[in-house]
């Protein structure tokens, strides 16, 4: 393990770089609380989504890296901001009329439109926990409602009263003139209606830790800031939560980055030490636009998992978190294949290589072996030429190519075959565009067909690739034009697999028949 720790301490993999930065926080003395605290936040106004997955996964990767380089215990809190007022009714839930009665109430006081839990907030919290448990994350769940009402937040709320002017000064600098006139860091919960009120303060009373304000009907109220009677606006809440929990690390999207100095300063004013943070870039859709929950562009986690494994999504999330990335269906095949490439590499690597390999950051020390005898991209091409409607069709070819492979003995391969059939039918099939060969290409295809008919060598990827290469070498310059012709004429795609491997998998006779059909004009 010492070799691994040495490699981790020197590794340039981004989780280790962040972990080392976090470790410097405790160079002189370990944390008084006895552990390093990681936090992720969740707004439970809707169901968990792919961004939630990415945030918890990446935080877990840094936590795992930290545990590799330090013996200080760690904890991860997933904090649900479920005391927020429901500002608008989500369009994708039932009982819309009934929900209108609860506009602006805290989410944990809003009627559950699904009529399964005591509130909409409780419903979405349960969905979050089920979501995180499905992926095997280790975390502790915190509810803002419970945090405020149980008194765990009381000391920081009292400090917010004592330091009210200082915190307001930080906030007012960031607000437009109009908003400044009515802004307060405190949002009272109306004692009668239960609604979260956005009203100015008449006074903030340091002697008894209360606030005085007029409600929307002009009636004056005085409430203690403790015990869940009041919540903080979201930006002050961020900093106050860091101070109250003594958070050491939190990551969030680039859209939060301009608020980081605000969160940090409020945390310090309220007696805390600002945490280390990590800002990740946002995901883009196929047109390069930012993915948005409300517009529904991009790809959901359920959609990804319809066509590929959880691990492939984890691999995609690991890659370059500080670079904006297109998150669309066409990135799935590459993520699947690269994940398995890294699995195969892991078994051959030394400590340094393993610490830099994404699969360590996905699996820790329990990295599985890949049982993929055929790449996912090759499976897609096989599904394309065979018109496969089920994975059993693909297994017929796989068994011939790798006689020892079985669905039971190769569960990853079996799962991938099912994914490939679904992906082919939904994305590849509708996009297939065949073209007729040029005269030069026709002559080359005829030569390849005849060479394959006469071939009596080993059914081996490299040997068959040599046959394909030999036919094109003298006729195409650059040689890439030959392979492009094979893909466009035979597969109806602009790019494709290593063709020798494709022939080995699909079969010599089947490939000959495929070429004959293309030459007879059956495709284009």
Image (spheres, helix red, strand yellow):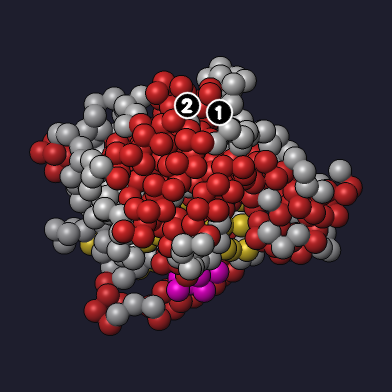
> What element does badge 1 sit on?
helix
Few, some or many residues within 10 Å of mark 1 (<14, 14–19, 20+): many
**Residue denoted by label 1:** 401
Task: Please state the extent of the stretch shown in magenta in the rendering.
Answer: 258-264
Location of residue 62 in the rendering, given as x and y in whole percent from the top left corner: 65, 52
Location of residue 246 in the rendering, given as x and y in whole percent from the top left corner: 63, 55
Location of residue 53 in the rendering, given as x and y in whole percent from the top left corner: 47, 45
Residue depicted at 20% across the width and 37% down the height: 93
Work out whether residue 433 can be spotted: yes
Location of residue 232 in the rendering, given as x and y in whole percent from the top left corner: 40, 58
Horizontally, residue 66 falls left or right of residue 127, namely right
Residue depicted at 49% across the width and 46% down the height: 499
Closer to the camera in the image, 373 or 132: 373
Work out whether residue 56 can be spotted: no
Horizontally, residue 108 falls left or right of residue 156, namely left
Closer to the camera in the image, 251 or 15: 15
Residue depicted at 28% across the width and 68% down the height: 200
Where, quadrant-wise, is the N terminus in this rendering? top right
Determine the main secondary structure of the stretch shown in magenta: helix
**Residue denoted by label 2:** 397
Count of picture labels: 2
């Amino acid at each position: 393990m010492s070799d691994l720790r040495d490699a981790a301490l020197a590794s340039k993999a981004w989780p280790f770089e962040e972990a080392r930065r976090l470790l410097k926080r405790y160079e002189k003395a370990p944390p008084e609380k006895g552990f390093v605290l990681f936090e992720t936040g969740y707004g439970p106004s809707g169901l968990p989504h792919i961004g939630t997955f990415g945030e918890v996964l990446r935080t877990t990767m840094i936590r795992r890296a930290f545990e590799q380089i330090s013996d200080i215990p760690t904890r991860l809190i997933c904090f649900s901001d479920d005391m927020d007022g429901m500002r608008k009714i989500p369009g994708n839930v039932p009982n819309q009329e009934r929900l209108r009665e609860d506009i602006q109430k805290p989410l944990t006081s809003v009627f559950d439109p699904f009529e399964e839990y005591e509130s909409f907030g409780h419903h979405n919290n349960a969905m979050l926990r089920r979501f995180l448990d499905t992926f095997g994350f280790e975390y502790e769940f915190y509810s803002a409602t419970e945090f405020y009402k149980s008194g765990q937040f009381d000391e920081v709320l009292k400090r917010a009263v004592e330091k009210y002017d200082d915190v307001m000064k930080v906030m007012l600098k960031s607000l437009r003139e109009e908003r400044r006139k009515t802004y307060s860091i405190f949002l009272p919960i109306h004692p009668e209606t239960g609604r979260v009120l956005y009203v100015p303060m008449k006074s903030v009373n340091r002697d008894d830790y209360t606030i005085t304000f007029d409600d929307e009907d002009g009636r004056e109220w005085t409430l203690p800031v403790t015990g869940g009677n009041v919540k903080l606006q979201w930006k002050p809440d961020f900093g106050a939560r860091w101070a109250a929990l003594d958070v050491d690390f939190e990551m969030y999207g680039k859209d939060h980055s301009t608020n980081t100095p605000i969160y940090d300063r409020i945390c310090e004013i309220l007696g805390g030490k600002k945490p280390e943070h990590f800002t990740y870039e946002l995901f883009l859709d196929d047109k390069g636009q930012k993915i948005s929950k409300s517009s529904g562009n991009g790809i959901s986690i359920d959609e990804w998992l319809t066509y590929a494994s959880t691990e492939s999504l984890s691999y995609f999330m690991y890659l370059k978190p500080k670079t904006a990335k297109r998150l669309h269906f066409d990135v799935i095949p590459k993520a699947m294949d690269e994940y398995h490439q890294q699995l195969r590499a892991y078994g051959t690597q030394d400590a340094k290589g393993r610490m830099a390999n994404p699969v360590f950051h996905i699996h820790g020390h329990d990295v599985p072996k890949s049982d993929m005898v055929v790449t996912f991209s090759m499976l897609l091409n096989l599904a394309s030429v065979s018109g496969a409607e089920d994975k059993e069709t693909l297994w017929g070819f796989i068994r011939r190519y790798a006689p020892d492979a079985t669905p039971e003995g190769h569960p990853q391969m079996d799962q991938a075959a099912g994914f490939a059939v679904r992906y082919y039918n939904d994305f590849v099939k509708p996009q297939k565009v065949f073209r007729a060969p040029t005269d030069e290409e026709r002559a080359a295809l005829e030569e390849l067909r005849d060479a394959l008919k006469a071939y009596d060598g080993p059914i081996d990827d490299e040997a068959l690739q040599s046959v394909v290469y030999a036919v094109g070498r003298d006729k195409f310059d650059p040689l890439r034009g030959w392979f492009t012709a094979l893909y466009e004429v035979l597969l109806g795609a602009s790019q494709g697999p290593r063709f020798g491997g494709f022939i080995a998998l699909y079969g010599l006779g089947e490939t000959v028949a495929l070429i004959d059909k293309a030459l007879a004009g059956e495709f284009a």
